[in-house]
Protein backbone atom coordinates (compact mmCIF):
# COMPACT_ATOMS: atom_id res chain seq x y z
CA UNK A 1 0.00 0.00 0.00
CA UNK A 2 1.30 3.47 -0.91
CA UNK A 3 1.31 6.00 1.85
CA UNK A 4 1.56 9.74 1.20
CA UNK A 5 4.42 9.79 3.71
CA UNK A 6 6.42 7.10 2.00
CA UNK A 7 9.78 8.13 0.57
CA UNK A 8 10.00 8.23 -3.21
CA UNK A 9 12.65 6.17 -4.95
CA UNK A 10 13.19 8.89 -7.60
CA UNK A 11 16.49 10.82 -7.61
CA UNK A 12 16.15 14.58 -8.20
CA UNK A 13 18.67 15.78 -10.80
CA UNK A 14 17.51 19.37 -11.63
CA UNK A 15 17.69 22.80 -10.04
CA UNK A 16 14.99 24.00 -7.73
CA UNK A 17 13.25 27.30 -8.42
CA UNK A 18 15.03 28.90 -5.44
CA UNK A 19 18.46 27.90 -6.78
CA UNK A 20 17.56 29.30 -10.20
CA UNK A 21 16.38 32.63 -8.72
CA UNK A 22 19.56 32.95 -6.64
CA UNK A 23 21.71 32.28 -9.72
CA UNK A 24 19.80 34.91 -11.74
CA UNK A 25 20.16 37.47 -8.94
CA UNK A 26 23.93 36.90 -8.75
CA UNK A 27 24.23 37.22 -12.53
CA UNK A 28 22.24 40.48 -12.53
CA UNK A 29 24.48 41.98 -9.84
CA UNK A 30 27.58 40.93 -11.77
CA UNK A 31 26.28 42.59 -14.98
CA UNK A 32 24.86 45.74 -13.34
CA UNK A 33 28.17 46.89 -11.83
CA UNK A 34 30.03 47.38 -15.13
CA UNK A 35 26.94 48.96 -16.73
CA UNK A 36 26.75 51.58 -13.97
CA UNK A 37 30.46 52.29 -14.35
CA UNK A 38 30.09 52.65 -18.14
CA UNK A 39 27.12 54.99 -17.72
CA UNK A 40 29.04 57.22 -15.31
CA UNK A 41 32.04 57.26 -17.65
CA UNK A 42 29.83 58.32 -20.56
CA UNK A 43 28.26 61.13 -18.50
CA UNK A 44 31.73 62.33 -17.43
CA UNK A 45 32.89 62.33 -21.06
CA UNK A 46 29.84 64.34 -22.17
CA UNK A 47 30.36 66.85 -19.36
CA UNK A 48 34.05 67.20 -20.28
CA UNK A 49 33.14 67.79 -23.94
CA UNK A 50 30.58 70.46 -23.03
CA UNK A 51 32.96 72.12 -20.57
CA UNK A 52 35.69 72.26 -23.22
CA UNK A 53 33.33 73.74 -25.83
CA UNK A 54 32.09 76.24 -23.23
CA UNK A 55 35.63 77.34 -22.37
CA UNK A 56 36.44 77.76 -26.08
CA UNK A 57 33.29 79.87 -26.56
CA UNK A 58 34.19 82.04 -23.56
CA UNK A 59 37.77 82.47 -24.79
CA UNK A 60 36.51 83.34 -28.28
CA UNK A 61 34.41 86.19 -26.90
CA UNK A 62 37.27 87.43 -24.73
CA UNK A 63 39.60 87.46 -27.75
CA UNK A 64 37.05 89.40 -29.84
CA UNK A 65 36.73 92.01 -27.07
CA UNK A 66 40.51 92.29 -26.69
CA UNK A 67 40.94 92.62 -30.44
CA UNK A 68 38.25 95.28 -30.63
CA UNK A 69 39.85 97.15 -27.73
CA UNK A 70 43.27 97.06 -29.42
CA UNK A 71 41.85 98.36 -32.70
CA UNK A 72 39.95 101.20 -30.99
CA UNK A 73 42.86 102.17 -28.72
CA UNK A 74 45.25 102.38 -31.68
CA UNK A 75 42.94 104.84 -33.45
CA UNK A 76 41.32 106.76 -30.57
CA UNK A 77 42.21 105.68 -27.01
CA UNK A 78 39.55 107.96 -25.50
CA UNK A 79 36.84 106.05 -27.38
CA UNK A 80 37.33 102.79 -25.46
CA UNK A 81 35.07 101.04 -24.41
CA UNK A 82 32.67 102.84 -26.79
CA UNK A 83 29.44 100.85 -27.27
CA UNK A 84 30.77 98.10 -25.02
CA UNK A 85 30.12 100.36 -22.01
CA UNK A 86 26.40 99.60 -22.39
CA UNK A 87 27.10 95.92 -21.64
CA UNK A 88 26.39 95.60 -17.91
CA UNK A 89 25.49 92.75 -15.57
CA UNK A 90 21.78 93.61 -15.88
CA UNK A 91 21.99 94.22 -19.63
CA UNK A 92 24.66 91.84 -20.98
CA UNK A 93 25.78 91.60 -24.62
CA UNK A 94 26.95 89.01 -27.12
CA UNK A 95 29.55 89.35 -29.85
CA UNK A 96 30.70 86.53 -32.09
CA UNK A 97 33.89 85.98 -34.06
CA UNK A 98 31.77 84.41 -36.80
CA UNK A 99 30.06 87.78 -37.41
CA UNK A 100 32.36 89.75 -39.76
CA UNK A 101 30.99 93.09 -38.49
CA UNK A 102 31.54 92.10 -34.83
CA UNK A 103 28.26 93.79 -34.01
CA UNK A 104 27.00 93.81 -30.44
CA UNK A 105 23.75 92.08 -29.58
CA UNK A 106 21.91 92.68 -26.36
CA UNK A 107 21.02 89.51 -24.48
CA UNK A 108 18.68 88.53 -21.71
CA UNK A 109 20.36 88.14 -18.33
CA UNK A 110 20.52 84.38 -18.96
CA UNK A 111 22.52 84.96 -22.16
CA UNK A 112 22.04 84.69 -25.91
CA UNK A 113 21.34 81.21 -27.24
CA UNK A 114 24.13 79.75 -29.38
CA UNK A 115 23.53 76.85 -31.74
CA UNK A 116 25.93 75.01 -33.96
CA UNK A 117 25.86 76.21 -37.56
CA UNK A 118 28.05 75.82 -40.62
CA UNK A 119 30.47 78.47 -39.29
CA UNK A 120 30.57 77.25 -35.67
CA UNK A 121 28.46 78.25 -32.68
CA UNK A 122 26.50 81.46 -33.18
CA UNK A 123 23.14 83.04 -32.53
CA UNK A 124 22.21 82.23 -36.13
CA UNK A 125 23.03 78.51 -35.87
CA UNK A 126 20.23 76.08 -36.68
CA UNK A 127 21.48 72.65 -35.68
CA UNK A 128 19.54 70.91 -32.90
CA UNK A 129 21.41 69.34 -30.05
CA UNK A 130 24.17 71.22 -28.27
CA UNK A 131 22.84 74.57 -27.07
CA UNK A 132 24.98 77.04 -25.16
CA UNK A 133 24.18 80.44 -23.68
CA UNK A 134 26.77 83.21 -23.76
CA UNK A 135 26.86 86.74 -22.42
CA UNK A 136 29.46 89.29 -21.42
CA UNK A 137 29.55 92.53 -19.52
CA UNK A 138 32.06 95.14 -18.42
CA UNK A 139 32.60 96.59 -14.96
CA UNK A 140 34.50 99.87 -14.65
CA UNK A 141 37.43 99.46 -12.23
CA UNK A 142 39.06 102.90 -12.41
CA UNK A 143 38.90 106.06 -14.48
CA UNK A 144 42.22 107.77 -13.99
CA UNK A 145 44.85 107.99 -15.17
CA UNK A 146 44.04 105.11 -17.56
CA UNK A 147 40.51 103.66 -17.45
CA UNK A 148 40.43 99.98 -16.53
CA UNK A 149 37.58 97.53 -17.07
CA UNK A 150 36.93 94.05 -15.81
CA UNK A 151 35.35 91.90 -18.53
CA UNK A 152 33.15 88.97 -17.50
CA UNK A 153 32.30 86.35 -20.12
CA UNK A 154 29.81 83.71 -18.98
CA UNK A 155 28.91 80.58 -20.93
CA UNK A 156 26.21 78.20 -19.78
CA UNK A 157 24.60 74.98 -20.96
CA UNK A 158 22.30 72.25 -19.73
CA UNK A 159 23.29 68.63 -19.49
CA UNK A 160 19.98 66.89 -19.15
CA UNK A 161 18.18 68.94 -16.52
CA UNK A 162 21.35 70.12 -14.78
CA UNK A 163 22.48 73.68 -15.66
CA UNK A 164 26.20 74.47 -15.81
CA UNK A 165 28.03 77.78 -16.16
CA UNK A 166 31.61 78.87 -16.46
CA UNK A 167 33.01 82.38 -16.28
CA UNK A 168 36.17 83.92 -17.70
CA UNK A 169 37.27 87.25 -16.21
CA UNK A 170 39.99 89.56 -17.51
CA UNK A 171 41.22 93.06 -16.70
CA UNK A 172 41.54 95.41 -19.68
CA UNK A 173 43.16 98.84 -19.73
CA UNK A 174 42.29 101.56 -22.20
CA UNK A 175 45.82 101.32 -23.53
CA UNK A 176 47.80 98.69 -25.36
CA UNK A 177 49.65 97.32 -22.36
Image: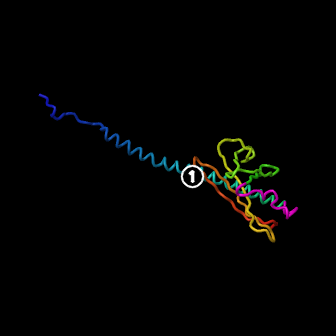
Find residue 118 and report its image quarter. Answer: top right
Q: Quadrant of the C terminus?
A: bottom right
Find residue 61 and report its image quarter. Answer: bottom right
Residue reaching furthest top?
1
Q: Residues within 10 Å of mark 1 (few under 14, many from 20)?
A: few
Query: Taking 109 as reference, is 101 left or right?
Result: right
Residue reaching furthest right?
75
* Magenta stretch secondary structure, dominant: helix
Q: Position of residue 29 (x, y in %)?
A: 41, 47
Report the front residue among 37 and 116: 116
Q: Position of residue 38 (x, y in %)?
A: 52, 48
> Which residue, given by chain and number where applicable, does mark 1 sit on?
44
Residue name at image x 74 percent, y 52 percent:
94
- Asked which colour scheme the image uses, the reply is rainbow
Residue 81 is a magenta residue: yes
Query: Taking 59 as reference, is 43 left or right?
Result: left
User: Mark 1: which secondary structure?
Assistant: helix
Report the front residue among 176 and 32: 176
Q: Quadrant of the N terminus?
A: top left
Residue name at image x 82 percent, y 62 percent:
80
Residue reaching furthest front?
90
Q: How many numbered dots are placed on residues in this image?
A: 1
Q: Position of residue 156 (x, y in %)?
A: 65, 52
Residue name at image x 21 percent, y 33 percent:
10
Report the front residue among 118 and 171: 171
Q: Position of residue 158 (x, y in %)?
A: 61, 49
- Does 107 appear above or below 11? below
Give the magenta part as a residue range.
72-91
Query: Taking 24 as reference, is 151 left or right?
Result: right
Residue 120 is a magenta residue: no
Amino acid sequence: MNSPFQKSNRVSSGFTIVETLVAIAILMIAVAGPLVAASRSLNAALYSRDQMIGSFLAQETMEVIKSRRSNVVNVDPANWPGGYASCTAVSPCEVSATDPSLSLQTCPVTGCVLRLGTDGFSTSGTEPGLIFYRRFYLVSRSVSPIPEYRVHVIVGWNQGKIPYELEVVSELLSANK
